[in-house]
Amino acid sequence: MAPPVRSVLPVVLLGCGGVGRHLLRHIVSCRPLHANQGVAIRVVGVADSSSLLVADLHSNGLDDALLTDLCAAKSAGSPLSSLLSRVSGQCQIFNNPEARTKVIDTASVLGKTTGLVLVDCSATYDTVGMLKDAVDCGCCVVLANKKPLTCTYEDFEKLVSNFRRIRFESTVGAGLPVIASVSRILSSGDPISRIVGSLSGTLGYVMSELEDGKRFSEVVKAAKSLGYTEPDPRDDLSGMDVARKALILARLLGQQISMEDINVESLYPRELGPDAMSTKDFLESGLVQLDKSIEERVKAASLKGNVLRYVCKIEGKGCQVGLQELPKNSALGRLRGSDNVVEIYSRCYESAPLVIQGAGAGNDTTAAGVLADIVDLQDLFHKTD
Ligand SMILES: NC(=O)C1=CN([C@@H]2O[C@H](COP(=O)(O)OP(=O)(O)OC[C@H]3O[C@@H](n4cnc5c(N)ncnc54)[C@H](OP(=O)(O)O)[C@@H]3O)[C@@H](O)[C@H]2O)C=CC1
Ligand SMILES: N[C@@H](CC=O)C(=O)O
């Protein structure tokens, strides 16, 4: 017999793309496991870019059959609003801008009663306001989306102001325990002097596939279909996605810096950027224009026994991210596929760094990281009766 439920965690999910849908599926499939741990996750609402589907706040949330249908509808490319005929009297659909207001109302009501975990699996800056309001209402926040933590330093400070109520493990290294390790080292009073790593699943995959003689344009498209890239793969190829991860880590180390303070090397010129062409055009006709120059760089490195890796370095007061030639048999050079590696140097890990390595991208592993973050908040949702 399952033990009594000790913690009920109401969740509102922002974003039901690749990661968000995997999260909902993991929540449904892990019900028996969580029940054995005395934990229940109640999905109260799910939002996409235009609508919010929200349950009656006195109910048990959206039921698993509806969540499954919702995932199927979104996978097929339909908006959440297409579920209108499917929803019962127990839930409602709000379209923007009412959807945003409803998220904040929900945070306000549940923040005062049961508590709420607002989970951001979108890829936009637009959620920052809702997240800050949720923090003000005493709610917990879990992020896969890096953008809210990488806008202004004031926003970052606000979001992490109650560190017990926020989790953002999946923003760096997908499911890898990078943030947890950095936080543990810091809270033990062991100063971190340097973090070096390969922090892009996409660029790691692309670089290792290029070594096998594949074409850059083909490999980038494969990375997108494997769920490694950002919605616009130029976010990865510009180095901005890695720079965001570097900024989150640097801010965690106490550096009060912004994106403008990070040196970022882009793999494509301005003429192929978002201001010049759509994502679709970039994938169809922009990418191939990069094949030759990247192939030449890979060959030049290979002649010296080296490989290319997109490296992130955080030390002292600065961060830099860019492409480097590294020996094939170095820790970063040996990386294959979407694996990330992160080396953390501190007083305790001075000559031999703490090394964290493993899958650094993908919807499944990222959603698993988000779910672990939600479950990690369970003690804040203990029933007191
Ligand atoms: N994939 C990976 O390996 C990893 C991803 N991440 C992060 O996870 C996040 C999600 O990635 P992914 O699932 O691939 O992205 P997708 O583009 O597949 O999904 C994004 C979702 O966000 C929704 N959305 C957009 N704007 C809003 C808004 N204002 N409010 C609510 N929802 C909104 C979109 O709606 P609509 O469906 O209507 O377009 C879509 O459902 C990103 O921030 C990414 O950086 C982090 C680590 C690893
Ligand atoms: N696009 C990112 C996904 C994880 O953050 C990557 O490739 O690493």
Image: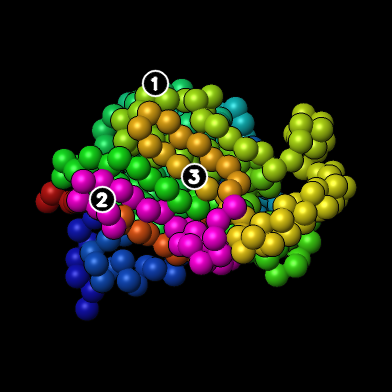
- For marks 2 and 3 on the same chain, the one whose residue lies earlier in the sequence: 3
**Which residue type carries mark 3?**
Cys
Task: Estimate the x, y position of residue 36 in percent, counting from the top left.
Answer: 26, 71
Nearest the viewer among 217 and 153 is 217
Q: Which residue is mark 2?
A: 350
Residue at the image position 45 percent from the left and 51 percent from the top: 197
Identify which residue, 210 or 19, lies in the foreground: 210
* Left or right: residue 221 compared with residue 338: right
Mark 1 highlights which residue?
154
Q: From this view, report whether residue 382 is shown above or below residue 327.
A: above
Query: Disc 2 vs disc 1: which is toward the camera?
Result: 2
Residue type beneath disc 2: Glu
Closest to the camera, between mark 2 and mark 3, is 2
Secondary structure category for the residue under label 1: helix
Q: Residues within 10 Å of mark 1 (few under 14, many from 20)?
A: few
Q: Which mark is residue 312?
A: 3
CA separation, marks 2 and 1? 32 Å
For the N terminus, the image quarter is bottom left
